Image: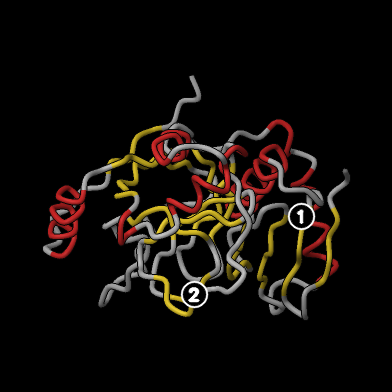
Amino acid sequence: MAVRYLAAGDRCVVAEFGKEIDAAVNKKVHQFNHIVKKRIKDGIVDTVPTYRSLLIHFDPAVFSFNRFVNELKDIEKTLDSAELPPSFIATVPVCYGGELGPDLEDMAGLTGLSVEEVVRIHTSVDYLIFCLGFTPGFPFLGGMDQRIAAPRLTNPRTHVPRGSVGIGGKQTGIYPQESPGGWRLLGRTPVKLFELREGDTPFFPLKPGNYIRFKPITLDEYHSIKEQVTQGEYQWDIKEYSAD
């Protein structure tokens, strides 16, 4: 599909790469994002990658809309030969079930699997981070095994605790902060996915285009890691990603 360039107000362009949630389409989004930020040094305010498109905020004092789109079209011609920087994979520890995963038993019933099988399947995949959204730092993940797909709750919760790991339809994700939500909760991670730090830029350990893998932990391990996080002593396990 040819890239479509759409106006979004008077200072934003949407570059649309497809209409489906697809890893290949998402890769092109991240390739384009990387090249655009590398090639255009002045005049870009921000970029926002999504599943299938890239929203680019530009400075109208530097570019007219048409000139900016022409710049993007020139960059598009180099897309197939461009390479992304290395991807990384972060391990996210999760305590499944009990009070921290109140929907795990129901998930087993809905899928016809045992609780142990749901957890094993959920922790056996390297999940591509398609994009961040809904709330700051919320990772929308690709690659979930469809054997554990389940519909969202009929009545969403008004309070979902920070760190809750859930499944909604064919997707899985992590609530980085307390919020309402309708996904079925399997467990909770003690690590922080979003944090405002005084005098610093916001902390986002997970980046679109990278990967995560869930690691099951016990309740004692959960509390131990939570204490490390509270004391500022927790070290993320993030490594360069290899699909092999």
Quarter residue 191 falls in: bottom left
Circle 2 residue: 157
Q: Amino acid at mark 2?
A: Arg
Name the residue at 34% across, 49% down. Answer: 96
Give the percent coordinates (x, y) of residue 71: 77, 56
Circle on res. 72: 1
Q: Using the image, determine if residue 60 lies above or below residue 29.
A: below
Local crowd size for mark 2, using a 10 Å CA cut-off: few (<14), some (14–19), many (≥20): few
Q: Disc 2 on helix, strand or loop?
A: strand
Name the residue at 43% across, 51% down. Answer: 105
Residue 240 appears left or right of 145? left
Quarter residue 199 falls in: bottom left
> Which quarter of the figure is the N terminus placed in?
top right
Name the residue at 83% across, 58% down. Answer: 70
Q: Nearer the viewer, mark 2 or mark 1?
A: 2
Give the percent coordinates (x, y) of residue 122: 46, 40
Residue 178 appears left or right of 231? right
Give the percent coordinates (x, y) of residue 125: 48, 34
